[in-house]
Amino acid sequence: MYVLGAVRHAGVVEVPVGTRVDAVLERAGGAAEDADLARLNLARAVVDGERLYVPRVGETAVPEALGPDVTGGSSGAGSGAGGTAGGPDAVVDLNAADQATLETLPGIGPALAGRIIAWREEHGGFSSVDDLLDVSGIGQARLDDLRDRVRV
């Protein structure tokens, strides 16, 4: 998995599938002093090929050069962690993406990303992309904009 952002040693770290984010951070030398760990789910299990971006305190968006993260088994983050590289065609796994990764999606800000994560935790995950309609603030038009950018 590729770890970058507010960590001591950014780069590729090898961990077994299912390793939790907190253990991945340790393999990257630990979080930097200005890491905003409250924006990460440290208990989330990672998947092969994922990219994990650790935001800094006060940072409001993932740096544009990183593009959206793709969190998923076949990838490529964080989270988000389909393809290995981020970019306009990257697909975000709704069941694995962290707050920062969700915020890279069109029309998804911090509040809506938080509601997506809360819905996911409350219902044990998304079984289909259409489940997004059950998240407060997501209607059919927004779902249509997101449909090609997300997966479960």
Image: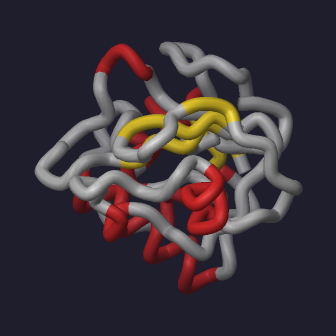
**Which residue is pictured at 26% across the width and 57% down the height?**
33
Q: Is residue 133 left or right of residue 61?
A: right
Residue 123 image-quadrant placement? bottom right
Q: Nearer the viewer, residue 24 or 148?
A: 24
**Which residue is pictured at 48% across the width and 36% down the height?**
4
Examine the rendered structure and indicate whether residue 94 appears above or below residue 53: below
Examine the rendered structure and indicate whether residue 44 appears above or below residue 51: below
Q: Nearer the viewer, residue 16 or 45?
A: 16
**Which residue is pictured at 57% across the width and 48% down the height?**
28
Indicate the position of residue 93 as horizontal and vertical percent values.
65, 46
Q: Is residue 58 left or right of residue 69?
A: left
Indicate the position of residue 96 as horizontal and vertical percent values.
64, 56
Q: Is residue 99 left or right of residue 131?
A: left
Residue 89 image-quadrant placement? top right
Indicate the position of residue 73 as horizontal and vertical percent values.
82, 43
**Which residue is pictured at 68% across the width and 67% down the height?**
20
Q: Quadrant of the N terminus?
A: top right
Residue 92 image-quadrant placement? top right
Please say whether residue 24 is visible from this viewpoint: yes
Examine the rendered structure and indicate whether residue 16 appears above or below residue 120: above
Indicate the position of residue 145 as horizontal and vertical percent values.
44, 30
